[in-house]
Amino acid sequence: MIKVLLEILILLLAIPIAYLLAYLCKDELKILRFWFRVLALVCIFIFVVLLVVAKENTAAILSILFIIIVSLVNLKLSHNKKFLGRYK
């Protein structure tokens, strides 16, 4: 039970970490928009493969989910003109 709660907490921490990365690297968000999309798609593919092949490898699955969350949040923020400010 505690392990599951800890895993959920770690995944929830991906959102503030993504906002922190986006805040610190505003100038690169627009430039790297394409690569965030590619990273998210590749990680989703790897996630599906890991679910089929290695169901017991929760560390790898959680790592891939963390990367997916961070890349999708940064992709969303790269389209937000209010967030980017002068780096539109």
Image (cartoon, rainbow, N blue to C red):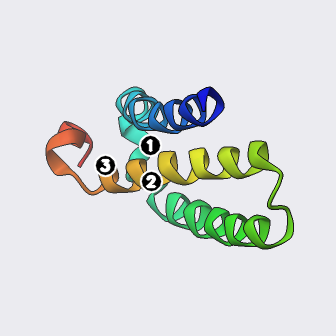
Distance from the alpha carbon under mark 2 to that under mark 3:
12 Å
Three-letter residue code for mark 1: Glu
User: In the displayed structure, does residue 42 sit left or right of residue 13?
Assistant: right
Identify residue for label 2: 31
Three-letter residue code for mark 2: Ile
Question: Where is residue 85, by image quadrant?
Answer: top left
Rendered image: mark on residue 2? none
In the rendered structure, are the residues bearing label 2 and label 1 in contact, judged by CB atoms less than 8 Å apart?
Answer: yes
Q: Earlier in the sequence, mark 3 or mark 1?
A: 1
Looking at the rendered image, the disc whose residue lies closer to the viewer, 3 or 1, is 3
Residue that protrudes farthest toward the front in the picture: 1
- Comparing 51 with 45, the one in front is 51
- Comparing 81 with 17, the one in front is 17
Secondary element under disc 2, as helix, strand or loop, is loop
- Number of marks in the image? 3
Q: Is residue 62 above or below residue 38?
A: above
In the rendered structure, are the residues bearing label 3 and label 1 in contact, judged by CB atoms less than 8 Å apart?
Answer: no
The spot of residue 7 in percent (x, y) is 60, 35
Secondary element under disc 1, as helix, strand or loop, is helix
Residue that protrudes farthest toward the left in the picture: 82
Looking at the rendered image, the disc whose residue lies closer to the viewer, 2 or 3, is 3
The spot of residue 61 in percent (x, y) is 71, 52
- Comparing 2 with 87, the one in front is 2
Crowding around mark 3 (Cα neighbors within 10 Å: few <14, some 14 to 19, many 20+) is many
Rendered image: mark on residue 77? 3
Q: Residue at x 44, y 59 (%)?
A: 33
